[in-house]
Amino acid sequence: MKACKYLILLAVLLFVGAEANAQGGLLGKLKDKAVDKVKEAVDKKSKKNKDKSEESAEEAEPQQDNKQEANKRKSGEGEYNKSDFVPGSVVIFEDALQGEQMGEFPSKWDVDQGTAEVAKMNSQMAIRLMNDNAIIKPLVKQNPNNYLPQVFTLEFDYWCNGEEDYNAGYILRMHNDDNMCWDISIDTEGSIRWAIQKGTSDEDVLGDFTTAGVENLDSWNHFALSFNERALKIYINGTRVCNLPNARAPHWFSIGGHSWEDHRDLITNIRLAKGGVELYNRDAQSMTSVERAIAETGKFVTNNILFDTGKATLKPESLEEIQKVADYMKKNPTARFEVQGHTDNQGSDKVNDPLSQQRAEAIVQALVSMGCDEFNLRAVGKGSHNPVASNATPEGRAQNRRVEFIKK
């Protein structure tokens, strides 16, 4: 309204100004100043109105977003957890193909059908499954037909060929009493299928899931599986694609596939471990690695506490691992631990036995310096007398150089 008044005034002044031009002088100058003032007022008013309009638009945007969000909720869209995998903490079998020779049969496996060889893809050592329907099974120390616990996780990386005319893939078979009770097929074109035996009956749970957008074609992908007494979950690259509440417990597993010409079925980084998320335990995912290991086995075993060669001097990077145990002890002030130091068989017992004792004592002192009660700690050097792997290979010796925190 005020802007309208300014415009009327401006028109009057322009009319007057036309008359004044004839007279010139002071009246003309006054007219010019008046016109400038009116223009300035109109410009200010226009800018103010524009700013108000922009502010209104900005305020409307979040309101519009809120409205869209409300419409989503009304239409039934929501959030849900698709990445709840927690790996087991006690390794039963592991193979990253380190130290293997190209073209040879992988040393940690046995053949059930066909054959396999060590290969390399994108600088990654892997097992190439050869021929039609090659099947291999891991070599384990336990009973080869009964080593899977009631709660376990199984992981491996597999190569996706990504060819449209190539619909083959990998088959994970879980066996019970010499019969196959799970048959999980991973298609390298973008789907996964399973036939799972329920309970002790012969009924199969048949299902399939399209993993298009989950699998990465012409690349390495990660497969993960968790089983707890009866609950089975399968994940591809962190996304859960199978969630079955009732499946028969398996005793051992095998992996199958095939390769010919340029088609390659390759797997690597296989890891089988005891433990995982407890059945319907909402707090299990917040457990630390120390808490999970102690809850499942009564001890925490680590290869991440390092010393200077031939000495009992802790390396600085070891303190982070020791801090995990210290945090557990502070949360559980009555917990008592025997801290065991273990070595490989390099060197004599005369050297290894006292060295492992001194290293265990160094760890105890580190825990005390972190606020733990020394009364709840006992250092024991075990030397090389209790190996958990073969000392004939570098990988085995690395596993034997460990520290065990055994809860008493």
Image: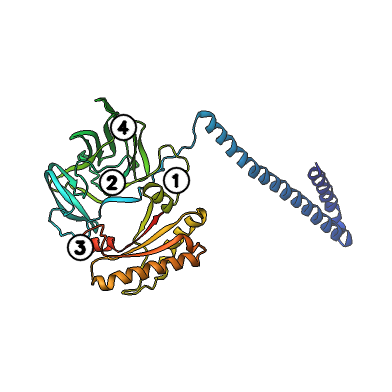
The answer to which of 179 and 122 lies nearer the viewer is 179
Q: Which mark is residue 206?
A: none
Q: Residue at x 31, y 48 (%)?
A: 273
Q: Residue at x 48, y 37 (%)?
A: 79
Mark 2 crowd level (few <14, some 14–19, many ≥20, 10 Å Cα): some
Asked where in the image residue 278 lies, by quadrant, the reply is top left
Q: Residue at x 82, y 58 (%)?
A: 32
The answer to which of 73 and 308 lies nearer the viewer is 308
Residue bearing mark 4: 247
252 sits left or right of 378 in the view: left
Label 3, secondary structure: give it: loop
Where does residue 81 sit, x and y in percent of width and height? 44, 39
Amino acid of disc 2:
Leu
Q: CA distance from mark 1 to mark 3?
A: 35 Å
16 sits left or right of 389 in the view: right
Residue bearing mark 1: 285
Reading the chain from its start, which is encountered first: label 2 or label 4? 2
Amino acid of disc 3:
Thr
Reading the chain from its start, which is encountered first: label 1 or label 2? 2
Q: Quadrant of the C terminus?
A: bottom left
Reading the chain from its start, which is encountered first: label 1 or label 3? 1
Q: CA distance from mark 4 to mark 1?
A: 22 Å
- Residue 317 seen anywhere in this rendered image of the structure: no
Reading the chain from its start, which is encountered first: label 3 or label 2? 2
Residue bearing mark 3: 393
Mark 1 crowd level (few <14, some 14–19, many ≥20, 10 Å Cα): some
Q: CA distance from mark 3 to mark 4?
A: 38 Å
Label 2, secondary structure: give it: loop
Mark 3 crowd level (few <14, some 14–19, many ≥20, 10 Å Cα): few
The answer to which of 135 and 359 lies nearer the viewer is 359
Residue bearing mark 2: 217
